[in-house]
Image: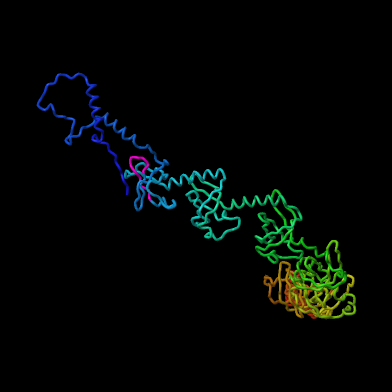
Amino acid sequence: MSFNINKQLNAEELEPAAVETAEATAITNAPAPAPIVETAHDDFDWSRDKRNVSAYSKEEKEKYDSVYDNTFKQINDGEMIQATIESLTKTDAVVNIGFKSDGLISLNEFRDIPGGIKVGDLVEVMVVEKEDRDGNLHLSRKSARITRAWERIVEVNKTGEIVTGLVTSKTKGGLIVDVFGMETFLPGSQIDVKPVTDYDQFVGKTMEFKVVKINEAIKNAVVSHKALIESDIEAQRAEIIGKLEKGQVLEGTIKNITDFGAFLDLGGLDGLLYITDISWGRINHPSEVLKMDQKLNVVVLDFDDDKKRISLGLKQLTAHPWDTLAENLKEGEVIKGKVVNIEDYGAFLEIMPGVEGLVHVSEITWANTPINAKEFFKLNDEYEAKVVTLDKETRKMSLSIKQLTEDPWSTIENQFPESSKHMGTVKNITPYGVFVELATGIGGMIHISDLSWLKRFNNPNEYTKVGNEIEVMILSIDKEGRKLQLGHKQIEEDPWNSLEDTFAIGSTHQGTVVKKDDKGAVVQLPYGLEGFAPARHLAKEDGKTIVADEIASFMVIEFDRSDKRIVLSHTRLWEQEKEEEKQVQIKEKKADQETTKKAVKTIQSKVEKSTLGDLSALANLKAKLDSDEAAEAKGE
C-alpha cells in the first residue's frame, strides 16, 4: 500500500494581494492605449474558461513550477538520508524524507530497535528508487543499515579493532554472526584454539570478534574469535618464554596424545613431552602411562626462542635406574627379565624399568645351528638368564640363557661317539643339507650327498621335511668347532658293492623315464636305482624318441661304483639286434660257400674224363660260387 500526496498549486491558492499587485504592475508598465472602438461584447474576458478560472502564460507557469519545486529536497537513488516517521499501519511505516511524496517501509526492518518505533522518530534510510514502476518512492532502512555496517566493518578490518557480535544461527562449516546489523561468517576453525564439534552451544551468545577477511565484490566478511584467544596466548607465551630456563620444573596439562609423545599446555604455551622422555623403561605408546587432561610436573629440557618450541621431560624428575642398581647384582648372578625388544642379533630383557640386558643369539642355546631371535622370543615373555658382563658406567649388560645349563659339548664323545646311531629331529633344511637336533644344544648336519646311496636330490626337501624324525650316524666330531657331521645313508651298507654284478655292462633292464631334458633322461631302474640315458641314446628304431613316463628297455653301457653312476642306452639295444641279424646272415652265406666248394672238389676227384655234361655242371657250380663271393664282398 502506498500514499501519493500531490501538492498542486492553483490560481485560487495565491494570495489576493499578490494578484492585485501583479495586475497593477502590468497596467503601469503598459504602453499608451490606442483609441478604443466599443463593440457589443467588449466587456467579456476571453482569458477565463468555463469554470471562471484564468489560464497562465507559459512564462508564468514555469515561474510558479520553480517556486513549487524549491519547496522539496533533491534526492538521488542510493542516497542515505534522515527520515521522520509520519504514521504507522499494521504492517508499514509512512516515512517523510522531505520529498514530494512519502515512502513506505515494512515494520520488519525495524525489529532490531528495542521497544519498536513511534511517530516522530528519526531513522536513516536509503533511497532505493525515487520512482518505481508504479510511480512510488522506494525506501529501505535495511539497505541503509547494511551499507553503514559494511563501511564500519571495512574500517575495523583496517584498524584491527575488536568488535562485538551476536551469534544468530548455525550454518554449514560454522556460525552466522550479526556485526553492526550485518551477517558475517565465523568458520568452525576460528571459534576456539581447541577443536569445536558442538556449534549449537554458541548460538544466541554475544561474543567479541576480529574481522580477519573481507570481500568487497560480494560484501562478505569473515570474523574470528580464535584470533583474539591466540593474541592473548601469544602475550602469555612471550611472558613465559622470557622467564624460561633449562631444568625449570613446570606444571602442565596434557592436551593431546600422539604416537610420538604428548603435548602439554603450560598456561598459554605448549610443550612436547617426547615418548623417550616419559619413562626410563620402554613404552609402546604414551597412552600406556598418560591420560588426556592429566596434570603433571615436567622439567624443561630445551627450548627455541625463535620457533617457540619447548622440549619437556618426565623421567628426568627421578634418578636413572642404573644409578640405583642393587649392589648385589654382579656377574654370574641369575636374574629374571621380560622381553621388551627383539632384533636380528638378539633380544633385550628388562630387569627393571630402565635397566635392560642383551641376550645375543649365540647365548640362546649350546647348539651351533643358526637361531632366529624373532622366532625364538616373543614380546613380554619372561626368561631367566645369567649375567655374563655388567658395566654400570656405560650402562650395558650381557645375558646368557644357555649358561644356565652345563655345556653338553664338554662330554660329547661319551654321549655321541663316532659311528653310533641316533634318532634326531629335522630343524632346518638348506639347499646343501639337513640340520638335525639330537639333544638340547647338540645337533649336526647331513650333507645332501649323505641322504641316499641310490638317489640324487636337487634339494633335501625332496627327501624330508622340517619336524620329521630321521635316523643318523655320527660320522665325525669337531669339538672345538662344536660341529657334528652326520650321515643317513650310512645306516645301511652301500648297495653299490652288490649291484655291480646285477647291472653289469651290456645287461638289459626295464626302466621308466621319470625326468627328461635336452641333455637326456633320468630312468628309474629296479631296486630303487636311477640311471642316466644321454639324449642320443633315447632314439627308437622307428625314428621317434622315448618321452617322459614311458617304459622301455635299456642297456647298461657304463657302471661307475665310485661316482655312483649308471649310463643307459635304448638305441644300443636295437642297433645291436640288427648287427646280430647281419652277422647271422653272413655266417649262413659262408656255410653255403663251404658246402659248394666241397661238392666241387668231390666231383673233380671222381670224374676222370671231361664230358660236355660234366663241363656244364662244373660251369654252373663255378658261376654260383662267383655269385656268392660277389654278394659277400658287397655286404662287407
Say if 347 sits above or below 588 in the image: above
Whole-percent x and y of residue 508? 76, 78
Question: Magenta residues, as a range?
Answer: 96-106
Q: Is residue 207 above or below residue 444?
A: above
Q: In the visual, does 84 lie left or right of 450?
A: left
Of residues 344 and 219, the one drawn nearer to the viewer in this rendering: 219
Q: Quadrant of residue 628?
A: bottom right
Q: Do we see residue 367 in this rendering? A: no
Residue extending farthest front: 17
How many dots with numbers? 0
Q: Residue at x 26, y 30 (%)?
A: 60
Q: Quadrant of residue 462?
A: bottom right
Note whether 94 is above or below 334 in the view shown.
Answer: above
From this view, report whether residue 59 is shown above or below residue 590.
above
| Between 516 and 47, the one nearer to me in the picture | 47
Image-quadrant location for residue 322: bottom right
Q: Quadrant of the C terminus?
A: bottom right
